[in-house]
Amino acid sequence: MIEAVHLSKEFARPVKEEGTEKKSGFSFGKKTMESFYAVDDLSFRAKKGEILGILGPNGAGKTTLLRMLGHLMTPTKGEVIVSDEEGNPITDEVKIKQAIGYLSNNTALYGRLTAREMFMLFGEIYGISKEDSAKRANEIFHLLEMEEFCDKRIEKLSTGQRQRASISRCLIHNPEIYIFDEPTLGLDILASETIIEFMKKEKERGKTVLYSTHYMEEAQYLCDRILMVYEGKKLAFGTPKQLMEITESDNLRDTFKSLIRELGSRDGTEVSL
Amino acid sequence: MRMKPMMILYKKEIMDLLRDKKTIIAMILIPLLLYPSMMLLSLLMMQGMAKQSAEKEYRIAMVESEVKYDVEDVLFEGANEKKYNFTFISYKTEEEAKHALSSKDVELVIVSEPVVFHESTASLFADSKLFSLKIYDLSANTNSTNAYQNVNDVLNSYSESLRQKALENAYENAEEIIHPIAYEVESISTSEENAGSLIGMILPFLLIISILTGAIYPAIDATAGERERGTLETIMTLPVRKSEIMVSKFLSVSTIAIFSALLNLLSMFGMIFYLYKTIDLSGLGMAGFEFSQFVPAMISLGICLPVFSMFTAAVSLCICIFAKSFKEANNITSPILIVFMFAAMASILPTVELTNTTALIPVTNIALLIKSVFSLDYNPGLVAIVLFSNLAYCLIMVVIMSTLFSSEDVMFGEGKNGVHIFERRANMKKGQIPGYGDIILLFAVMLLFMIFASSVLVLKFGLWGTAIIQLLILLMPVLYAFYLRSDLKELFSLKLPKFREFVGSIVIWIGGLLLNQVLLSLLMRLFPQMNETSQSLFDTISGVGFPTALIVVGICPAIAEEAAFRGMLFGTLQKRTKLIIAILVSAVLFGLYHMNFLQFFAGLFMGIIMAYMVYKSKSIVTSVVFHMLNNSFSVVGTYYPNIIESIPFVGSAEPGIKEYMIMLFAGVIILVLGLFLFGAFSGRKNLAKTEEV
């Protein structure tokens, strides 16, 4: 089980200045930094055996949120609590990472190694014995239909094959929690199918799956619950059905649009999508 | 940190790196092939050139005369003896011969005439070939002058032999007349030393650059490469700590750098051994060269180079971690290359040697160590200093590296290009602020310039050398900032101060002077062995008039150094970081620039005050005035010591505790008064604590 408690992350970004281009020779575009919250006070809990979708437009803070959940980044405020099967929180960072399988489109693989070599090396880091790793590698490569290319250098694989190799990488240590950051982005139908099927299977095995996307249809079909974020803030949280009911629409796409429009009218600013 | 995951990561890094062609090329191919062949080539060329000039045939025009054949005989015999090669061509008249010379058909013209000696001497030279000569050459033509030198050499030997014969004919103990003072010359330098110093000049440079390229490629691959390929995030999802990742990367890059260094060393010694075995080294002044003499040299290098390689690996990693792609990494590593090259060049300068001080300068110390090791005049104490200072620098770099690795800004950031100078100027934005890398590069270049080039300029041009140095120091930051298209007015705080600020800088100077005196005498008491007085200033300006000295030593450095330190350096830092850090960092760099223990503290103290003045007034004029007054005070003190001595307290020769207390007290009050003029206490923030140190 994984829980976010008042999670916030502060970043610095350059202030956007209007009309900086002066014509006089010595104008000086002052580049001052301002701080902003990429993730702003988010609290939620993901249960065993559910797929929790995190939805939001680009720059909503999805990646930052997932990085904090995966303990790749430290939150500015709040905390992420990961508990073991008895519900006791795990405190050691290394042990937390043992419980999480993290996959994003930034987690590429070592091109100069083969899938099997990488599997064995990472297995060692996860503390699995060589014999067990080798056995597990064969099982997983069979499961993901990777046998024919698992001994080729990864740089020589196709995108779909690489994606499967990536999945095999997060399966090594049989984690309880999966965190997937836009796993289907830029993949063809067949490749994204593999991932979606995989998530469903893991859910059935009682694993927790957290996943972000901006494909609304995919989320509507796959997720048990959905967290909608916008500018780092919680926009809505509930089952797809609940969310659609609030906005009286029959698909998530319209729900999302009308929620943002509502937010825009509250602030008095126009939101463009 | 746990050993096991670290070793697994290390295994992964090495496996990954060794499958990269670029690393293999930089690590193995470059040391094994390129650079021994370069050395071999240059040695062969040197040898070839030496042979060529000895065996070249020179054509000599002989003008017909009675003694022509005598001259030819003498020259011919002499040439045989000395291994010269002359061909004689006969000409009827002097005019024809001279014409042939100017159209380069011959190298030399010899006109001979018989000569009749005085009766008393003629008997001494009986049976000798005697003549008088007139020689024409083309002094602008190397071949012709070489021909003349050869002929001259032969004729001198011939005259010498005639003289000896004559003396022997006249006296019984002629030898005593010829050599009234007998002496022998024997060079203390052994041929190992000669060989070593020749190799020692070029080798450090090659070796250091080779080690650096051996380290840079894996460092780029392990940082920017991982980021570009997107594996950095993958590795962070693993159950390992960031420190473990960092150490494994450091160890793997070091391994490759060390391997490359040792390979360099081996290939170098292999080459020397090969040369020793196969080529006649006597032509290069290396006869009697004993290879075994170099074994201790090899051992000390074998110990120091790995440590240096680790330092290099750490430096490369620290820089490369900022880059987000290979391209950017190549961009930002070029300054390291330049700084390393500059520092390594010390070994080529004949005057720079390994001393207690130079043994502390990173990179330079290794270059000088290699040089001294090859001239076989190294001492183990200095080797130890080099070894330990490199260890210390290496540790410092590792600490910096771990800070960088634990920073999310660095690891997930968009990558900050710290050095802008290597980008295309057309792509630069107007009003760009220089990066941290830019000011580090500028400072390193200035420092190395001061260490190595300035002494040469002063030796060559005396006081004018000092003026040239100051001009160059002024030009460096200004041209740099101009190239970056920075806003010069803003960066260098080019603005006239308000009148009260102008007065304020004079007042602050008086206060600063009093406090500086207290500070310096305190330091001199604490570290009496460091008492290096301003003798160097006295040396520089001795022999010139007061006004010239005032301009060159008092005013020029004030402008140049202010442009660099309070302009470019502080101006950049001020825009990029907190005020207090900007002030302190610029002041520390200013202190380091003086390269003298006592002056470091004086520079630090003055640097803090001056940076604050520039910050407050936004005018560099204030710090220039301060600096000018300060330097001029020393010049006045050198020329008119009685003026300074007449000033109460400051000029007193042996101030006691009471005087110091008064100076301290007065100094603080005057300083505060000056700061008041700068409006230091009218703002919201009370920064008074900052400047009082």
Image (tube, rainbow, N blue to C red):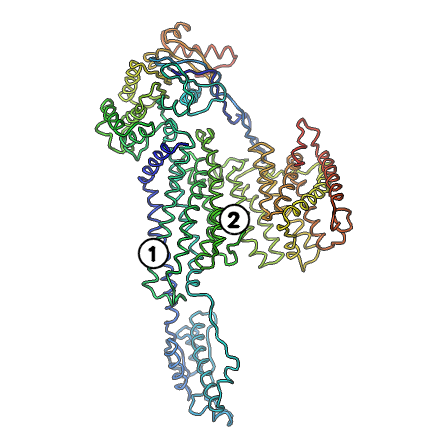
Write down the quadrant of residue B222 in the picture: top left
Chain for disc number 2: B
Q: Is mark 1 on a helix, strand or loop?
A: helix
Query: Where A59 falls versus B284 (above or below)?
Result: above
- Residue assigned mark 2: B360
Q: Is residue B342 visible?
A: no
Q: Residue at x 52, y 80 (%)?
A: B181
Query: Where A117 falls versus A76 (above or below)?
Result: below
Q: How far apart are marks 2 and 1 (CA)?
A: 30 Å
Q: In the depicted view, which residue is nearer to us: B347 or B442?
A: B347
Q: In the shown orientation, is residue B393 left or right of residue A1?
A: right
Q: In the depicted view, which residue is nearer to us: A76 or B109?
A: A76
Q: What residue type is labelled 2?
A: Leu
- Could you say where residue B645 lies in the image, as x and y percent from the top left? 76, 51
Q: In the depicted view, which residue is nearer to us: B620 or B39?
A: B39
Write down the quadrant of residue B18 in the picture: top left
**Which of the labelled discs sits on residue A23, or is there none?**
none
Q: Which amino acid does label 1 sit on?
A: Gly
Give the mark, 2 or 1, whose residue is nearer the N terminus: 1
- Residue assigned mark 1: B270
- Could you say where residue A16 lies in the image, as x and y percent from the top left? 52, 25
Q: In which quarter of the image is the C terminus of chain B?
A: top right
Q: In the shown orientation, is residue A130 left or right of residue B222?
A: left
Q: In which quarter of the image is the N terminus of chain B?
A: top left
Query: Where B586 falls versus A97 (above or below)?
Result: below
Q: How many marks?
A: 2
Q: Is residue B140 visible?
A: yes
**Few, some or many C-alpha atoms within 10 Å of disc 1 (few <14, some 14-19, many ≥20)?**
few
* Pointer 2 with pointer 1, Cβ within 8 A: no
- Could you say where residue B568 lies in the image, as x and y percent from the top left? 58, 40
